Image (spheres, helix red, strand yellow):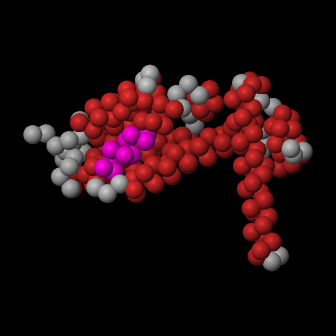
Amino acid sequence: MPRLWDETIEAHRREVRDAILDTAAAVVAERGLASVTMSQIAADTGIGRATLYKYFPDVEAILVAWHERQIADHLDRLTEIRDRASSPIDQLHAVLQAYADISHEHHGNELAAVLHQGPHVARARHRLHDFVRDLVELGATAGEIRDDVPPAELATYCIHALAAAGGLPSKPAVRRLVVVTLSGLRQPP
């Protein structure tokens, strides 16, 4: 098979898969998690059920794949945000603010709440922890972050503290939480 044909087929498969994931999330948002069926997803996506079953064995597999994509998008977003900031403390501040915003925006999402378990979430949490730990380490090396506590412990502190953003009532409250969290990372006088 020519390479161009292979690339075209793969692109088509990605588009169909993305359409299935987007449709499933829309059905959940519109009708609730309990009402999602393979038939409904196929109909709303505009594909046959047989085609849908070629991609996913059941609704749960679709929803897990959707959630994995969401998590990957969040981690990519944090990486982009880090790369736009210059100093280690600015990078850490920007990433922590973005993480807190994500936690705040997705609080109460029925689909994410059900799916925030399992091995894909454990892997994502581990990646997030390593990501924040590395930023803390850079900040400590630059003298901007305290070095009397191991970076891994400070990363755990940040992630747990900012998870509370999901329960805050407003964006200003989220910003204040980030400022308080960052103050705990600064070098003691």
Quadrant location of the N terminus in the rendered image: bottom right
Q: Main secondary structure of the magenta part?
A: helix
Q: Position of residue 171 (x, y in %)?
A: 42, 30
**Residue at (78% x, 70% y) in the render:** 6
Please tell me whether residue 34 is drawn above or below residue 4 in the rendered image.
above
Q: Residue most toward the left?
A: 189
Q: Is residue 123 visible?
A: no
> Residue 140 or 152: which is nearer the viewer?
140
**Residue at (76% x, 44% y) in the render:** 20
Q: Position of residue 58 (x, y in %)?
A: 78, 38
Q: Is residue 141 visible?
A: yes
Q: Position of residue 67 (x, y in %)?
A: 62, 40
> Residue 122 or 173: which is nearer the viewer?
173
- What residue range appears in magenta? 90-99
Residue 73 left/right relative to 86 = right
Residue 135 left/right relative to 114 = left
Please tell me whether residue 65 is drawn above or below residue 161 in the rendered image.
below
Residue 62 left/right relative to 140 = right
**Residue at (81% x, 31% y) in the render:** 37
Q: Residue most toward the bottom?
A: 2
Residue 116 figure quarter: top right
> Residue 34 or 78: which is nearer the viewer?
78
Q: Is residue 18 magenta?
A: no
Q: Position of residue 176 (x, y in %)?
A: 32, 30
